[in-house]
């Protein structure tokens, strides 16, 4: 590892868990489980219903991980301005394209021309499943990086040609629609957040107060947008909203503090030249991290069940102050992170009643601020788990999946499920969810998604990655 780069295992684990949560929550039986197993503001979005469940945590966790990773990867590239900006815009473009490929190469509802039955297992649109699997391998070729410096242009060109051919075949051969709105909204949002967050980080990498000034400016713009209804006006303009909407600004409230965390844990605080490498911090003791874990559980229950905000604030602040006292003698490097977590969390909880409840849809200030504080606590807690369980199945699986996020995100829908259908093993998958047994369906989803993450982690350990 070069001196100017840094990778933190806990960050990969947390990112891997967030992707697991995204895929898992989409597979659990819908409508047959308690409300805490789904989004609180779910389709058709009841935006008047306040609160967030654990499902509403997974997306902001990924945004936070992206923000932390920006300076970890950016410091080395920032030494050459041309290299930094060329790499930034190429990666943004590839992420933007990926938001379309994830949908266009895995179209839903196509009738297909070939239905097959084997051992009483009926696979409809068998030919479509084969093409979806081919689409996965085309994306594999287009985004594949096996080791640093690996850049076989002919492989990427071949993958790109195969992708274009498959999209054309789906459109003209199977009637799949092809519009600018045919993309993954989540991936498109992440692409723009990466672009805006990286530009802000680069401009302020030596100027901490400049970054916080931009942060406050974004809060102000977001407030005006909400108060004037500009965000709703823009979202209703489909000619504009396909590429830009105010959520790309709102979630910077979460991402910008995350870039500071990335600078801090890597020891590259350019504005002071300090060395803060968190992994070199002396152990604090189990109680410190047990308290963080209990705080996470408390917030998860409290934000869903809508406990009194003053109870939430009092307990959260008390736990974090106690953590500061515990770290006082051995790990003062933790002070800034705990202080930032407390500040974001308390501001978020204070804004809850002003906005008539925390919500993911539309994203409230309370949601963005609170999740920023929660994510810092989660990162510290998983830092502890990685130290306690080095080399464990949990750490190896989720760190490997988290280090390979593009592949992890589409592997189930574009690889595992088509393989199950093409081999007729989908019959076993369907039988694993007996009618009227939703919790068995949850267990099935958990096992199959964990298996998917494990397969991706194997490729990661072999140095095979998808990279934008």
Image: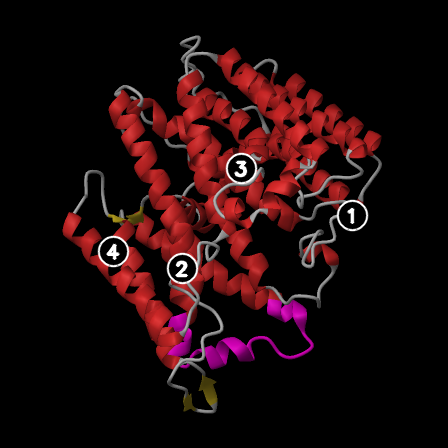
Q: Position of residue 364 (x, y in %)?
A: 68, 37
The mark that comes first in sequence, 2 or 1, is 1
Query: What distance separates the C-alpha of mark 2 from that of mark 4?
Result: 18 Å
Q: Is residue 86 visible?
A: yes
User: Where, by quadrant of the figure, is residue 338 drawn?
Assistant: top right
Task: Kindly indicate whether the residue at mark 4 contacts the one at mark 2 (C-beta within 8 angstroms).
Answer: no
What residue would you read off at disc 1? 48
254, above or below 48, in the image? above
Q: Which mark is residue 411?
A: 2
Task: Kindly indicate whether the residue at mark 4 contacts the one at mark 1 (C-beta within 8 angstroms).
Answer: no
The mark that comes first in sequence, 2 or 4, is 4
Query: What distance separates the C-alpha of mark 2 from that of mark 1?
Result: 35 Å
How many numbered callouts? 4
Quadrant for the N terminus in the image = top left
Residue, x 27% and y 65% (percent of image)?
165
**Residue span colored magenta:** 418-441
Q: Would residue 203 appear left or right of 216 to someone viewing this image?
A: left
Q: Is residue 6 visible?
A: no
Q: Position of residue 259 (x, y in %)?
A: 48, 26
Q: Which mark is residue 248?
A: 3
The mark that comes first in sequence, 4 or 3, is 4
């Amino acid at each position: 590892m070069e001196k100017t780069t840094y990778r933190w295992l806990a960050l990969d684990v947390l990112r891997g868990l967030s992707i697991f949560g995204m895929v898992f929550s989409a597979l659990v039986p819908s409508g047959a489980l308690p409300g805490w197993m789904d989004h609180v503001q779910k389709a058709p979005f009841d935006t008047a219903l306040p609160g967030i469940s654990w499902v509403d945590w997974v997306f902001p966790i990924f945004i936070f991980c992206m923000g932390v990773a920006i300076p970890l990867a950016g410091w080395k590239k920032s030494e050459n301005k041309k290299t930094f900006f060329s790499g930034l815009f190429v990666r943004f473009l590839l992420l933007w394209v990926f938001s379309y490929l994830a949908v266009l190469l895995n179209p839903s509802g196509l009738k297909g021309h070939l239905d097959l039955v084997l051992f009483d297992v009926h696979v409809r649109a068998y030919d479509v499943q084969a093409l979806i699997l081919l689409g996965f391998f085309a994306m594999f070729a287009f985004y594949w990086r096996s080791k640093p410096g690996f850049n076989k242009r002919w492989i990427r060109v071949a993958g790109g040609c195969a992708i274009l051919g498959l999209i054309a075949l789906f459109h003209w051969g199977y009637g799949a629609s092809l519009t600018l709105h045919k993309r993954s909204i989540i991936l498109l949002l992440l692409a723009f957040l990466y672009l805006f967050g990286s530009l802000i980080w680069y401009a302020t990498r030596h100027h901490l107060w400049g970054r916080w000034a931009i942060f406050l400016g974004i809060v102000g713009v977001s407030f005006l947008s909400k108060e004037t209804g500009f965000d709703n006006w823009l979202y209703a303009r489909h000619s504009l909203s396909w590429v830009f909407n105010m959520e790309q600004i709102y979630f910077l409230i979460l991402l910008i503090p995350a870039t500071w965390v990335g600078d801090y844990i890597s020891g590259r605080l350019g504005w002071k030249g300090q060395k803060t490498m968190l992994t070199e911090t002396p152990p604090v003791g189990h109680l410190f991290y047990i308290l963080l874990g209990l705080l996470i559980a408390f917030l998860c229950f409290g934000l869903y069940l809508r406990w009194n905000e003053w109870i939430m604030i009092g307990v959260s602040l008390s736990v974090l102050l106690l953590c500061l006292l515990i770290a006082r003698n051995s790990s003062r490097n933790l002070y800034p992170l705990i202080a930032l977590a407390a500040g974001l969390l308390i501001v978020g909880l204070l804004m809850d009643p002003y906005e008539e409840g925390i919500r993911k849809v539309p994203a409230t200030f309370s949601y963005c601020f609170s999740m920023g504080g929660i994510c810092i606590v989660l990162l510290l807690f998983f830092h502890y788990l990685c130290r306690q369980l080095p080399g464990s199945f949990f750490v190896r699986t989720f760190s490997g999946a988290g280090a390979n996020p593009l592949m992890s995100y589409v592997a189930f829908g574009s690889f595992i499920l088509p393989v199950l259908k093409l081999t007729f093993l989908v019959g076993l998958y369907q039988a694993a969810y007996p009618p009227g047994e939703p919790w068995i369906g949850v267990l099935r989803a958990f096992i199959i998604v964990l298996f998917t993450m494990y397969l991706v982690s194997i490729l990661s350990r072999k140095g095979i990655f998808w990279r934008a």
